[in-house]
Amino acid sequence: MKILLINLPRVGGAPVIREERFEHKDFEMVQPPLGLLYSASMLRGAGHEVALIDANALDLGLEEVVRRAAAFGPAVILSRVAFDVQDADAAALKAVKAAVPGALAVTRNKILSDVPELRDAFMRRHPELDYFLLMEPESVIARVCAALAAGLRPPAAAWLEGGAVREGAAAELPAALDDFPFPAYDLLETMAPYKTSLFGPVYTLVLSSRGCPFQCSFCAYCRSKYRERSAENVVKELKWLKEGIGLKNFVFFDDTISLKRERTMEIFRRMADSGLGLKFGICTRVDLLDEEMVVAAKAAGCVEIGFGVESGSQKVLDLAKKGITLDQIRKAFALCRKHGMKSIASVILGLPGETEETVAETFRFIAEIDPYYCQYAIAVPFPNTAVYRYYDERGLILTRDWRRYNPLEVEPVFRTEALSAARLAELKRKGYLKFLLRPSFILSKIEPLDLLWNIKGFLMYVHRLAVLLLSGRKYVR
């Protein structure tokens, strides 16, 4: 059976990330469609004829996507929708399906799947979509398409009436991610578009584990089953990627890579011993990092570690059920400075308990820990989170226009008990300016032996300052 996977077009000219941990419109990063690449490998392994269109990366217009889809003539079209552009994505998928008579459209979004009333409303608005996956597509798509190829509705054990997929038993998921075939990168036309602010081509995402057992009240992806790949399997893929696509840079796309310390250390040791020479970044928690791990990560090629700092107020951290202390944050950033590792602090303004004083504490704390870069975001109360319930119960949600539920939005979609939406936006802008205008920030970014880096960094710095000072862009990272 012919199956077409589509990373749908950009929305409003902006690239969109449609992955399990990040499902939103961006303005800078272009990420490879890792979930679709895994699904493609699963489907090919099951004997299907598979094609993939990454309209987002190639910046293809909808007309071109429709033309390519019609030329391939699939029986099934698989895509993902991002929460903040769900209706725009659904409209694009409808246009594609209209050009391919008889094709079945299957889609997925984690946040929608967690909130049945929103999922059902989405499907009612878009009856042209045939099925909505509640489980991760990579784990069920081959079984689903086998049922479709046999001319059957998917089995009752996996599907609800009306086209929505029922959450299956945990036993239906692979026991370990080692069972996944490597992603089907050969289906991509080019690796050139994929990039972040730090990493350029040839760049990709690498998944070494999936799931997060922590309870952070603001997170749409935590409280999920943790599964991991073996260190041997991860390094085998890295060698395969370097040989196959000329990989130079990547980010470990794990929720928390260091959850199992010895496995993480073994990955780093094997990478260092392999001599791959790859540069990469990781994200983890400050309480799951120690000096030996920082040293091992650096020896393996790690150049950047991102941490969810969230707040400089212990009260706010505790209310958010983050489970970390300010001293643990201090220690993690001190270790990064000691060993020359770029440290990224992610801060969320507007969590429950936020006041003028707690924001001031956060600004002082960020100056104290002195990260390589700090990313300020205003909390997004996604409707599958405890933060949403907190603000909803208190009548503090200002809009349910899901298009505005994006972590890069300038204007928040709620207010706190102490701070208006306008004041939160002003404080976010103030935080960025306080951070970016410090002489120490500018001086620390200069690389004496890398002129190209300095030029690129200077242009990025000027651009971000202009965004903040002129308020001429909708999104700020």
Image (cartoon, helix red, strand yellow):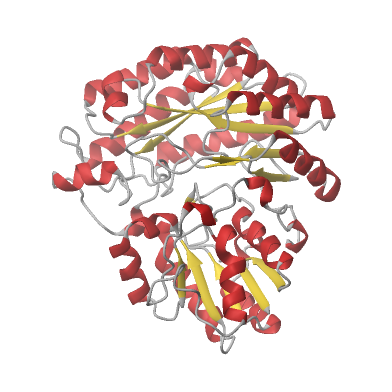
Relative to 40, 26 lies left or right: left
The answer to whether residue 9 shows anywhere in this view is: no
**Residue 134 rendering spot, x and y as whole percentages:** 44, 61
**Residue 72 rendering spot, x and y as whole percentages:** 70, 81
Which residue appears farthest toward the bottom when viewing the image? Answer: 101
Residue at the image point whose x is 72% and y is 67% from the top: 44
The vertical placement of 83 against 157, above or below, is above
The answer to whether residue 86 shows anywhere in this view is: yes
The vertical placement of 400 against 98, above or below, is above
Residue at the image point whose x is 39% and y is 21% from the top: 324
**Residue 120 rendering spot, x and y as whole percentages:** 32, 69
Relative to 92, 236 lies left or right: right
* Quarter of the image that includes the N terminus: bottom right
Examine the image and state in which quarter residue 429 appears: top left
Examine the image and state in which quarter residue 315 appears: top left
Taking depth in this image into account, of 450 and 37 the one nearest to the observer is: 37
Taking depth in this image into account, of 268 and 90 the one nearest to the observer is: 268
The vertical placement of 136 against 127, above or below, is above
Residue at the image point whose x is 42% and y is 30% from the top: 432
